[in-house]
Image (cartoon, grey):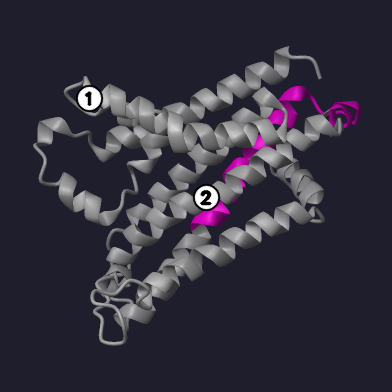
Amino acid sequence: MIELLRIEWLKLKQYRTFWVLMGLFMIVLPLWNYGFSAGLLKFGGGKKGVNFLTSAYTFPEVWGHLGFWASYFIMFLSFLMIIINTNEFTFRTNRQNVIDGWSRLQFFHGKVMLVVAMSALATIYLFVLGLLFGWANSGSLNGAMTDIYKVGYFFILSLNYLGFGLFLAIWIRKSGLAIGLFLMYSLFLEHLCYGIINRFTVKPYGNLLPLQSSDELLPLPWATMAKSLLPVESTLSMSTYVLGTMIWCLVYYLAGRTMLQKRDW
């Protein structure tokens, strides 16, 4: 598996789009959060305004806020995953891999390893940013490990989003169409579907749809406070969302594997 990942890296290290989208994720995420932590939103405005997000970037609250915003910027890496894999079919490099001795399954597992590796790197980056923001706003590292499990939630969310991007790339094989479908589904269709499902069910089972299941792991912290006021029987546990997300990741894996083995190359 490590050898497959090494070969994927050799393909990517001189690919400009890879560095552009990775750079956007790594630059925009801290800048966005710095804007909030430095007082972008103030009650009353002006120099005398009150920054009501001052405590949002202290320990342990920083993990929830940083994770919530990172769950939006992971889209950059999802697009990257789509582009990388659709290019394999566009430029027929998938066939070249097979000619060079790979099996179709090895080709697929190389892509799966790339999903895991990019998710792990994004999570490590989030962890480092969390330590920096928390230390800068708290003045120490006291409480840094409190709520650290939210960093693990971000890893699971990253696997879900990048895995979904890989699935779309293998299914559609055209980057523009795959990215368009990703955006339409994530920003519109899924919200419509889970809203309809939740309206007619006792518990919010619509929240278990593919991307929403992991979004529920890192909600806006203020929304978490509001949800805590709801009756226990009307909510789903975090363990349910973790399990639901991992089941969807398995679905992406099995569906992608089946399509690659059965479809023409």
Residue 136: horizontal and vertical position, in percent? 38, 80
Judged by its main secondary structure, the magenta piece is: helix
State whether residue 13 is above or below residue 232.
below
Residue at position x 62%, y 37% from top? 179
Residue at position x 33%, y 79% from top? 137
Q: Is residue 32 left or right of residue 39?
A: right
Look at the image and tell me whether residue 234 can be seen: yes
Residue at position x 85%, y 32% from top? 97
Residue 252: horizontal and vertical position, in percent? 54, 26
Inspect the image, locate mark 2, and give the three-letter code of the amino acid beneath it. Ile
Q: Is residue 133 left or right of residue 260?
A: left
Inspect the image, locate mark 1, and give the three-letter code of the amino acid beneath it. Arg
Residue 74 circle label: 2
Disc 2 on helix, strand or loop? helix
Q: CA distance from mark 2 to mark 1?
A: 29 Å
Q: Quadrant of the C terminus?
A: top right
The quarter holding residue 79 reads top right
**Nearer-the-camera pick, 43 or 18:** 43
Look at the image and tell me whether residue 246 can be seen: no
State whether residue 61 is above or below residue 229.
below
Q: Is residue 220 left or right of residue 30?
A: left
Label 1 packing within 10 angstroms: few (<14), some (14-19), many (20+): few
